[in-house]
Amino acid sequence: SITSTGLSYLSNATRSDSCRVETLWLQGIPIEDDGMEVLAQGLVGNQSLRSLYLDDGITVASAGWVAFSTALCDTSSVNNTYLSNHTIQELWHCGAFDFIDIDEDIVQYSV
C-alpha cells in the first residue's frame, strides 16, 4: 500500500523535467479523491507520461476527476492552458469506464 507521502513523491517525480515514465499503472492500492488530486498535480507540465491506468481498489469520485480534467486542460488562464498536460493519450479506470482515448474523446468532469 502506498501512503500519502509516497503519493506526494510520485507526484513530484512525474512533475520533474527529468521524468521519462511513459506508462503508469496503479493497481490494488487504496487511493481516493485526495490522493488522485495529489497525482493530478504531478501531471501538470509532465512531458513524458502517455498512458495512465487506474485499476481495482482505486476509488475516484467527482473531485478526483475534476482534478484530472483540470490537469489535462486548465482553461482558467492562457498560461494554465499552456501548462496543462498535453501528452497523456490514454486514461483507463477499471469500473468507471473501459478506456478513454484523450485524442478522440473530450472529457470534462464537473462537480
Image: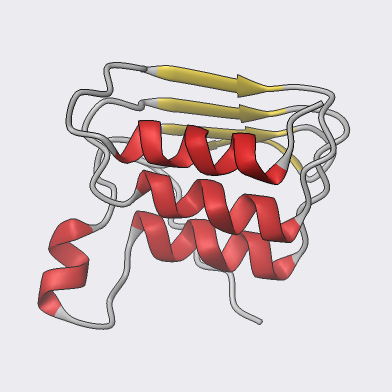
Say which residue appears at 13% left-offset and 61% top-offset: 82
Say which residue appears at 83% left-offset and 48% top-offset: 59
Taking depth in this image into account, of 68 and 94 the one nearest to the observer is: 68
Above or below, comparing residue 69 to residue 78 in the picture: above
Q: Is residue 3 left or right of residue 5?
A: right
Does any portion of residue 30 appear in the rendered image?
A: yes
Taking depth in this image into account, of 7 and 84 the one nearest to the observer is: 7
The x, y position of residue 6, in whole percent, is: 62, 34
The x, y position of residue 12, in whole percent, is: 39, 40
Say which residue appears at 72% left-offset and 59% top-offset: 33
The x, y position of residue 28, in whole percent, is: 84, 24
Above or below, comparing residue 95 to residue 61 in the picture: above
Say which residue appears at 43% left-offset and 56% top-offset: 106
Residue 53 figure quarter:
top right
Taking depth in this image into account, of 44 and 66 the one nearest to the observer is: 44
Q: Is residue 84 left or right of residue 64?
A: left
Q: Is residue 4 left or right of residue 101?
A: right
Q: Is residue 83 left or right of residue 64?
A: left
- Quarter placement of the N terminus: top right
